[in-house]
Amino acid sequence: MPFPEYEELERPLLCYIHQNGGSKFEVQASSTYIPLADHFRLSTSERLQLRGDGRDEALWNNMVQWARRKLKDNGYLESAPRGVWRLSAAGIKAAERLCNPRR
């Protein structure tokens, strides 16, 4: 499967943090890459593909970090220690609306 568009990453990332972040709705950034790659059914080679700008960083990880930045810009993440992504009150509310299956 080809890489998803950047915008397609935001909702799954929001939902992942909400569903896996415990009572504080926070996760370690590094814990998001594999589950999201699994969600999008990325191949091993896609997961390991480097950015192409000379940096030794996986393109996939960078894409997830950009989705995190958009969530922060939209007010869905609050400030947290480096490497920790925590939902804000607005993020929790959005996740409850967007991520919970309808009953």
Image: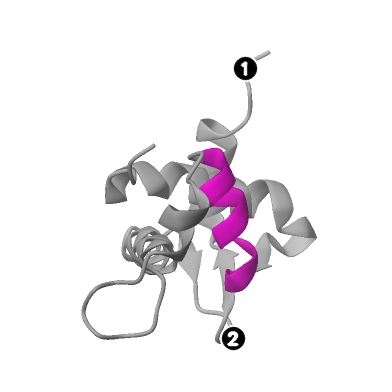
Give yes or no for contact between labels 2 and 1 (Cβ–Cβ under 8 Å).
no
Residue at x 72%, y 64% (from the top left corner): 24
Residue at x 58%, y 44% (from the top left corner): 38
In the picture, the quarter occupied by the C terminus is: top right
For disc 1, the marked residue is 102
In the picture, the quarter occupied by the N terminus is: top left
Residue 41 vertical position relative to residue 66 in the rendered view, above or below: above
Q: Of the numbered discs in the image, which one, if any, rests on residue 81? A: 2
Residue 73 place in picture, x, y as percent: 31, 65
Quadrant in the rendering for residue 51: bottom left
Residue at x 33%, y 58% (from the top left corner): 74
Q: Is residue 66 magenta?
A: no
Residue 61 vertical position relative to residue 14 in the rendered view, above or below: below
Residue 87 place in picture, x, y as percent: 56, 61
Q: Amino acid at mark 2?
A: Pro
Q: Magenta residues, as a range? A: 29-39
Specify how the rendered protein is coloured: one colour
Q: Is residue 96 visible?
A: yes
Relative to the observer, which residue lies in front, 60 or 100?
60
